[in-house]
């Protein structure tokens, strides 16, 4: 078991109250000595639960998550929960009702710093989760945990909701769930691109922030203020990166070690860790000194509030520790990699050190005496068996030994060198070993004393870790913005419900091509909340909608965005339906996967959500796919009224702009010359009236015969549809001459499948009118059939 690994435990209980689905959770972070609880309602897709799992799931090998869960009884919901749990890599242990039934408040109070009844938690239900957590971890059985833990609420509403579909679609983390990845030079994911962090704590903090974008304008602006300061103050940022952060150890692991020392747990803390704490104190002093120099030139509130005050308070908390370490550890030797207790720290060590020095002098005197007696050069060398022995050239030693062979004991002959010892050397070495062992015993005792003193400062180290990791991330954001091929801008948050992005780019694409085409976006909830985006394959539709979502995400984590202007409101969720694929092992087709995602999207989206949809409806027939795409877009525009970017190849959907308020058409432009297509990657207002599939196929050098056959089949299909529509017009359209133009327009622009249904209904209508002479009844028939046809056209 890795002693430096942090162990996280999430307990989940799924219960049904008044036919509503409730999830009760307790989360344990062992290193932080923190238990957090929450209770929430969820939908049948368990989308809130999925976001919770992603937020608490660690991203590196230095932490391990275990999920204890009471699975839902309904088979369909059980399957959905299992699908979510399988997407990420952690241990899952199923629990049953009895694991949540018995509650022992005394065991809970045993580990908490303050009596459990004084906390404002979610009453009885979360108490059951805490009890299950304690029974699994047995924390109350370990006396070192007594009154060491805090408890609080896990506030899910504080953060923007990101599910795994959005994380994968936007390439935020590597696609196989959330796990550690290779930090190479190529930015394959958003976290790769943003990670300019110097410290390990900063890298962990960055991953947490990306998974938990803020929804508080005040907190976001607090981050942006610091990023802006570091963006413009290059010299101070360079000082932070090169002279401060590069010399900071992994404080998360450091304070975890000392917490284990304080709790009398098994640990591997040693004097080198104490020296790291000492070096941390020195670096904090250096930072404060540099900040004061900056303040002499400019009284910036960021310097005062973010750097000076917090770090001065942190340094004050380290009071007296610096002096203790200087007295107790030999720092001069520590700088050469030797970590020992300073002999002056103990009278015993001082005396033993003198005795060891005397023994070494005695050994040296024996060497000089032996060298004089033999008349040859004799060296003192270390030996694993004898500790110290003499060495001389073999030929010289053989001749010298003849004078008194019994006095000199040969040990070995190797490479023309002879090693030997004498009685006086053995006696002096024995005394040396005795004093050395005594010194080590006393030093071990003193090391434990030192560790006990230093470990009492682990909460201060924890506070320093939080301060430094956050500064590291914000400095990383400033470095990303400063070193980008084109300028990044600070996003402006407004209460007004509009998104304005001028000259936006996709940051990962810009790394590959610094001259990539920029595009604008303007959305508001009233007049243009849903954009229908059409255009050719490979024209840039998918890249465009993703880059908009990424810009919004970057703004909410407190980072500058790749735009010239960025105005955004608070977004509560980024929801994606991009690129469905089949799951053969579970019997889920591409279309089923697409519909499951779409269903979840419609039930979880709210007015302040941002939805991006790419090519919805491709998994079934063209007519049905178009019908589904239209219905979903209409529901988003009319009922949900959230922000939505809808990329599609169904050009008929552009008619929606004329029928539904808030819908606007956009297209990615291209040029066609001599049956060739030239992509311009520019998003413009309006709609395209044709498909470019065959031109794209020609660009990809499809065989000419294939292209010709495709053109012929496309022409046949167009003629077939034209004939079907002609039949419809001849047989039915005359019936609607007495109806207003709106119904005729809807019929003419409906899908082929809808038109077939209308034809059948029109036949009934025609026969009823033919046999009815009464004018009033004829009007009733017309109105009734009109309502039926309008329903068919929805």
Image: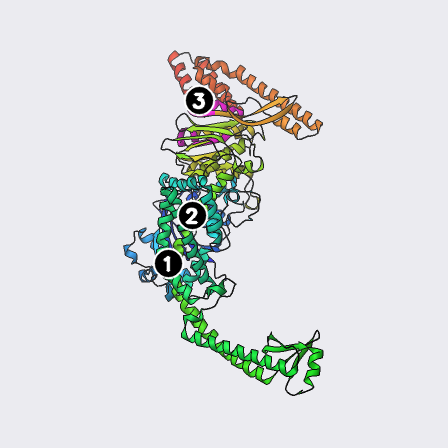
Which residue is depicted at the point 31% across and 53% down?
124
Q: Quadrant of residue 699?
A: top right
Contact flag, marks 2 and 3 (Cβ < 8 Å): no
Q: Could you tell me if residue 557 is visible in this image? A: no
Pinpoint residue 745: horizontal percent, then vertical percent: 47, 18
Q: Nearer the viewer, residue 204 or 16?
A: 204
Q: Earlier in the sequence, mark 1 or mark 3?
A: 1
Which mark is drawn over residue 318?
1
- Earlier along the polypeptide chain: callout 2 or callout 1? 1
Foreground residue among 347 and 645: 347
- 438 relative to 307 in the view: left or right: right
Percent x, y of residue 654: 50, 24
Eyeballing the image, is 720 above or below 601?
above
Residue 375 coordinates in the image, percent (x, y): 66, 81
- The CA distance from mark 1 to mark 3 is 68 Å
Is residue 285 rendered to the left or right of residue 760?
left
The correct choice, above or below, for 361 with respect to 793 in the image is below
- The residue segment tinted magenta is 635-664
Query: Compared to 592, does 110 lie above or below?
Result: below
Neighbour tally class for label 2: few under 14, some 14-19, many 20 plus, Cα within 10 Å: many
Quadrant of the image occupied by residue 461: bottom left
**Residue that carries the numbered disc 3 in the rendered image:** 659
Task: Identify which residue, 529 or 499, lies in the foreground.
Answer: 499
The residue that mark 2 highlights is: 470
Instruction: Kindly tell me whether residue 166 is visible in this rendering.
Output: yes
Q: Secondary structure at mark 2?
A: helix
């Amino acid at each position: 078991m890795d002693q430096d690994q942090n162990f996280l435990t999430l307990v989940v209980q799924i219960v049904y109250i008044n036919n509503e689905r409730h999830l009760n959770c307790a989360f344990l972070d062992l290193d932080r000595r923190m238990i957090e609880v929450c209770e929430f309602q969820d939908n049948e897709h368990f989308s809130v639960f999925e976001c919770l799992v992603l937020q608490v799931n660690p991203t590196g090998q230095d932490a391990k998550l275990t999920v204890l869960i009471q699975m839902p009884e309904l088979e369909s919901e059980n399957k959905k929960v299992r699908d979510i749990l399988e997407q990420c890599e952690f241990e899952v242990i199923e629990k049953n009702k009895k694991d949540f039934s018995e509650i022992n408040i005394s065991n809970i109070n045993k580990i908490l710093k303050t009596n459990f009844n004084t906390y404002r938690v979610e009453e009885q239900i979360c108490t059951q989760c805490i009890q299950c957590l304690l029974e699994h971890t047995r924390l109350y059985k370990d006396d070192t945990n007594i009154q060491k833990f805090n408890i609080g609420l896990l506030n899910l509403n504080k953060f923007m909701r990101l599910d795994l579909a959005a994380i994968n679609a936007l390439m935020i983390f590597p696609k196989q769930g959330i796990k550690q990845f290779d930090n190479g030079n190529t930015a394959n994911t958003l976290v790769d691109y943003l990670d300019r962090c110097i410290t390990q704590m900063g890298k962990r903090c960055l991953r947490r922030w990306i998974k938990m974008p803020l929804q508080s304008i005040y907190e976001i602006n607090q981050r942006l203020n610091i990023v802006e300061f570091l963006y413009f103050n290059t010299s101070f940022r360079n000082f932070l990166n090169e002279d401060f952060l590069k010399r900071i150890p992994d404080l998360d692991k450091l304070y975890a070690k000392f917490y284990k020392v304080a709790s009398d747990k098994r640990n591997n803390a040693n004097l080198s860790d104490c020296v790291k704490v000492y070096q941390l104190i020195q670096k904090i002093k250096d930072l404060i000194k540099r900040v004061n120099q900056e303040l002499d030139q400019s009284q910036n509130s960021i310097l005062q509030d973010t750097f000076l005050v917090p770090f001065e308070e942190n340094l004050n908390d380290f009071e007296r520790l610096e002096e203790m370490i200087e007295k107790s550890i030999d720092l001069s030797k520590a700088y050469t990699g030797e970590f020992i207790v300073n002999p002056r720290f103990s009278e015993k060590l001082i005396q033993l050190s003198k005795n060891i020095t005397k023994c070494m002098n005695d050994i040296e005197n024996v060497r000089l005496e032996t060298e004089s007696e033999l008349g040859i050069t004799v060296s003192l060398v270390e030996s694993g068996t004898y500790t110290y022995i003499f060495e001389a050239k073999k030929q010289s030693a053989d001749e010298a030994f003849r004078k008194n062979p019994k006095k000199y004991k040969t040990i070995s002959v190797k490479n023309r060198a002879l090693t030997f010892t004498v009685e006086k050397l053995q006696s002096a070495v024995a005394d040396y070993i005795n004093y050395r062992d005594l010194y080590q015993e006393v030093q071990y005792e003193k090391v434990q004393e030192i560790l006990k003193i230093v470990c009492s400062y682990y909460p201060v180290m924890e506070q320093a870790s939080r301060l430094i990791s956050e500064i590291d991330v914000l400095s990383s954001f400033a470095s990303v913005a400063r070193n980008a091929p084109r300028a990044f801008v600070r996003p402006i948050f407004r209460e007004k419900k509009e998104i304005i992005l001028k000259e936006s780019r996709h940051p990962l694409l810009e790394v590959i091509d610094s001259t990539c085409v920029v595009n604008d976006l303007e959305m508001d909830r009233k007049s243009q909340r849903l954009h229908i985006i059409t255009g050719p394959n490979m024209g840039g539709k998918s890249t465009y909608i993703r880059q908009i979502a990424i810009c919004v995400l970057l703004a909410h984590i407190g980072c500058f965005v790749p735009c010239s202007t960025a105005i955004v409101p608070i977004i509560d969720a980024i929801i994606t339906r991009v690129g469905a694929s089949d799951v053969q092992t579970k019997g889920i087709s591409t279309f089923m996967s697409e519909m499951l995602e779409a269903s979840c999207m419609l039930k979880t989206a709210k007015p302040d959500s941002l939805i991006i949809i790419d090519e919805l409806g491709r998994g079934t027939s063209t007519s049905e796919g178009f019908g589904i795409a239209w219905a979903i877009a209409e529901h988003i525009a009319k009922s949900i009224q959230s922000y939505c970017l809808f990329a599609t190849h169904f050009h008929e959907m552009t008619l929606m702009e004329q029928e539904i308020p808030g819908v606007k058409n956009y297209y990615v432009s291209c040029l066609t010359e001599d049956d060739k297509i030239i992509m311009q990657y520019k998003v413009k207002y309006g709609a395209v009236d044709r498909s470019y599939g065959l031109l794209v196929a020609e660009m990809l050098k499809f065989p000419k015969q294939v292209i010709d056959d495709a053109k012929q089949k496309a022409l046949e299909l167009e003629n077939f549809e034209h004939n079907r529509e002609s039949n419809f017009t001849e047989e039915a359209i005359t019936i609607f001459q007495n109806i207003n133009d709106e119904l005729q327009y809807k019929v003419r622009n409906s899908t082929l499948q809808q038109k077939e249904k209308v034809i059948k209904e029109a036949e009934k209508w025609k026969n009823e009118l033919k046999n009815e002479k009464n004018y009033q009844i004829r009007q009733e028939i017309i109105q009734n059939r009109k309502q039926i046809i309008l329903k068919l056209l929805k």
